Image (tube, rainbow, N blue to C red):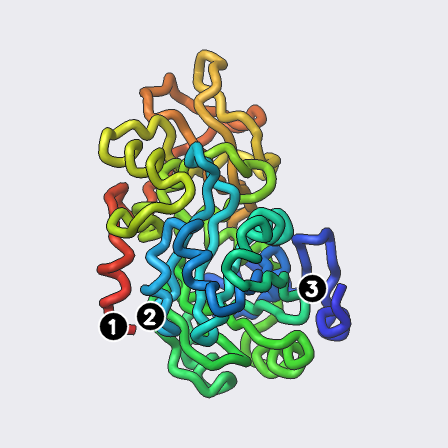
Amino acid sequence: MSDWMTALGGRRVSDERVEFDTPDPARAALEGTVTSPLVHLAMLDVAGAGAAKLLQGQTSAQVELADGHFAPLTSFCTAKGRMLANAQLLRITPERYRLILHRGLAQPLRQHLAKFAPFYKCELQVRDDLALVGLIGREAQALAEVRCDLVPPGLWHQAGDETLQLLAHPGPQPRLLICLPEAQAAALVAQLAAQAPLVGNAVWCLQDIQAGLAWLTPAHQDALLPQMINWEALGGVSFKKGCYTGQEVVARAHFRGQVKKRLSRAQLEGEQVPPLGASVLDAEGKSAGEVVAAELDAYGQAEILAVLSTRDHAEPLRVEGQPAKLLKLPYSIERVDPESLAQRAG
């Protein structure tokens, strides 16, 4: 674990998890404001004269929309349209872009993009020298404005400079993500924690689930079309840009209505958190899909995101023997063009 998290009382449970002693952390986020190191996420920088062109040919985002204010969602696909990673794309300077994605996919994506980087005079770097910190709760925006000296941006927008970036993410509570040098993280987090107690990053991951926001992990790399995690409904796919790897398959699935699996949200009647990839079974014991994210909620029950077949299922559904109750997603399964999101005021 980084020294700054240890000094603040953090316990590294795994490479992707950190915990603190704040009681009932998920409830604390509902009733107040909390701070969390987002150790499950990583940052990959793409820098150089041809960085924009490299990304334009590889991502589902319209790269020119990433202008230092709008920070679109995107995905990287194989030629068959299966996702290698999904990410949020920031522009740090005219020749430096930053991708925020699941930690387990940062190095594999860097290796994938390294095949093209020399042709575009680009450098690729996983930024282990940077930290990501999350603020969750009703006072998150006011606290960030005071401690970061920045007006919080609107959803999927960014504020800040080359050193510190502030991003807004969706969720049942206001959520802000702060990206800054690791060397400065301890001081800032200590200031935030004085008003917003430290909690483990499981709380942030739970709010992702409740927002219907799935971040691809190694468990599902090269297995899902972007639409299977509702990425186009979140503005993560531009259908107005030119070619990129996988574009033909992704576009055909959209325009011909051939998406046979969709992301769904559910609550399990039990406190057992299923592993990623766990099968969702229907009442006849047949597979209806599989789990892509799972966490315990404020009431001690497991909540999940699962990619399910769009066909009708014999209910009740079950996961690891626990009945599953389907919940509504906080958005419609309709295409949202990132071009329209970029025009919205912060």
Q: Residue 81: x, y in percent?
A: 42, 36
Residue at image coords 45%, 69%? 176
Compared to 133, does 283 lie above or below? above
Say whether marks 3 and 2 touch (CB < 8 Å). no
Which of the two residues, 309 or 190, is positioned nearer the viewer here? 309
Q: CA distance from mark 2 to mark 1?
A: 7 Å
Q: Secondary structure at mark 2?
A: loop
Instruction: Name the amino acid, label 1.
Output: Ala
Q: Residue 223: x, y in percent?
A: 50, 32
Say whether marks 2 and 1 touch (CB < 8 Å). yes
Residue at image coords 38%, 25%? 309
Residue at image coords 48%, 19%? 287
Give the residue pinned by disc 2. 154
Q: Is residue 13 visible?
A: yes
Sequence-earlier tag: 2 or 1 = 2
Which of the two residues, 47 or 209, is positioned nearer the viewer here? 47
Say whether marks 3 and 1 touch (CB < 8 Å). no
Sequence-earlier tag: 3 or 2 = 3
Left or right: 191 in relation to 339: right
Residue at image coords 57%, 47%? 112
Sequence-earlier tag: 3 or 1 = 3
Give the residue pinned by disc 3. 21
- Residue 345 bears which disc, if any? 1
Q: Residues within 10 Å of mark 1 (few under 14, many from 20)?
A: few
Instruction: Name the amino acid, label 2.
Output: Gly
Q: CA distance from mark 3 to mark 2?
A: 32 Å
Q: Secondary structure at mark 1?
A: loop
Q: CA distance from mark 3 to mark 1?
A: 38 Å
What quarter of the picture does the N terminus occupy?
bottom right
